[in-house]
Image: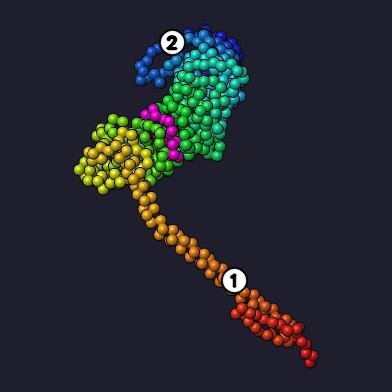
Amino acid sequence: MNETKLTTFDQLKYIYYRFRTLTFANYPFIPSKAFRFVHFESQSVKQTHRENNRNVIAFVNIEQTHSGIFEELSLLDSAEQLIVSFMNSPSLTYANGALSKLSCYELKLSNTNPKIPIEFFSNTVSIYHLIIDNPSFIGFLSSSSQTFTFQISKMSIKDVSVRSLQGKHFPIVFSSTRELTLENYHANGGFRTFNSRELAQRFPQLQTLTIFSRSIQHITKRLFEYFTQLEYLRLTGITTIENEAFYNLHHLKELYLGKHILRLDPYAFLHMNTKFLYLNESLDFQLNDDRHFCVFAQFSPLTSVKTFVQFPQHLDTCSCTIRYLYRHLDKSWMSFTPDCYSNSSLYILSQEERLCYFEQRLLQCHVLPDEGITIFGKHYNVSYFYQRQTSKQRRHLTIFYEHRLQILIGVLAFVISLILIICTIRQCKQRKTSAYRHLNRLLNRRQLTGNDQITMDIIYHHTNDRPDILLPPPTTTKV
């Protein structure tokens, strides 16, 4: 429909056809109760086909909305059946309460005015999935101190242009939101960080958080500290995970680290728990036993509470880190392990594991699982490794104390030798400098003799074993 008259919506009462999709383009405004005469196709379909049989109302190039445009809309099960889209309306004026009484499965704002007042959602009943796909999202605006709430389960913001996302960009509390997606596609600007405390207050029941930003490459310390209810955390575009990056995330079920991980700090996974840790798509990540064994050793090796770490499948050789993580793995998970581990017999694997010397490697780790560790059928308490680490440190201190005199003499001898070397170098430089000065004097005197026809007698004498020159007053000879 490309009409611009208000009566178009009134004329819909004479149309008895049941609509599945309605599109309104180039309307100056959408009036209140615009769909009170519309009959929708509400024939029930199977759950598997419902996604392709939902009712759709689309608005294209709309300039203004009035309040309550969806009031008296008649559609059974609209919370699961209705999709509403505002598209290509960059100058759209959002009326307060425009979505009053609306209950829909999806509401999408695509390429519309980025200044969205939160009052636009006033008196809304429920929205399962809110999608904001504007060129730049600067947060919801608020023109009053009045607060309200409505049901929204999932929110996706496709292009966050705010450098630091804070609570003020979400003026109300989204207490029913379980899933939040934040994306940014600008490499040199836009979404760089967020205030964990304030966002957690705005989304107190958040369980799934997905972040993609070309401006964020480092996950810093305790970035997600206040999202204590998170169960699924998906990060894309990240290259570095710093120490304690996932602090206080003890309810995680899945941690997805994306495709670009290059560096993991030694305590990257400290003070957190997760059932699945996905590194399988970071093909450029170089697993190294010396740097990464203790990074993953803190995860419990017990089968009942084990953290499953999925590495890239293309690994040709199994490092000791992989062998340590998969040694108690349930056989049902073998299909997800790297080829280097799954293609060997259990006998060969056990023989290769002994060459890793797990006990010696674990002594290098400062953080180990509290449940203890079982190595080749023998269970060790964590205190066993900590006590040996302490005794090892004490042994080093004892050795230093016993040989303190020899060490002190050696340090003094080294310092004296260093001072003598520096003094010798300085004396050599001074001698070279005096020799250069002597040559310059000779050259200057020779030039004067040739130009002015003056004969000069040069008398040499030594002072402090150094040759010096005494020049008598010049005498002129007339020819």
Residue to which mark 2 is pinned: 76
Q: Is residue 208 visible?
A: no
The image position of residue 263, as x and y in percent, is 42, 43
Count of numbered tags: 2
The type of residue carrying mark 1 is Gln
- Residue 327 position, x and y percent, is 26, 39
SS at circle 2: loop
Q: Looking at the rendering, which quadrant does residue 169 occupy? A: top right
Q: Is residue 124 left or right of residue 348?
A: right
The kind of residue on which mark 2 rests is Leu
Gap between marks 2 and 1 measured at Cα: 99 Å
Q: Nearer the viewer, residue 136 or 271?
A: 271
Disc 1 crowd, CA 10 A, few/some/many (<14, 14-19, 20+): few
Residue shown at the point (54%, 24%) measured from the top left? 170
- Which image quadrant for residue 402? bottom left
Q: Are marks 2 and 1 in contact (CB under 8 Å)?
A: no
Q: Which residues are magenta?
A: 242-261
Display coloring: rainbow
On the image, the x and y values in percent for residue 77 come to 43, 12
Q: What residue is at 75 percent from the left and 84 percent from the top?
A: 474
Q: What secondary structure predominates along the stretch shown in magenta?
A: loop
State the residue position of label 1. Answer: 430
**Residue 156 on the magenta span:** no
Residue 304 screen position, x and y as percent: 28, 30
The quarter of the image holding the C terminus is bottom right
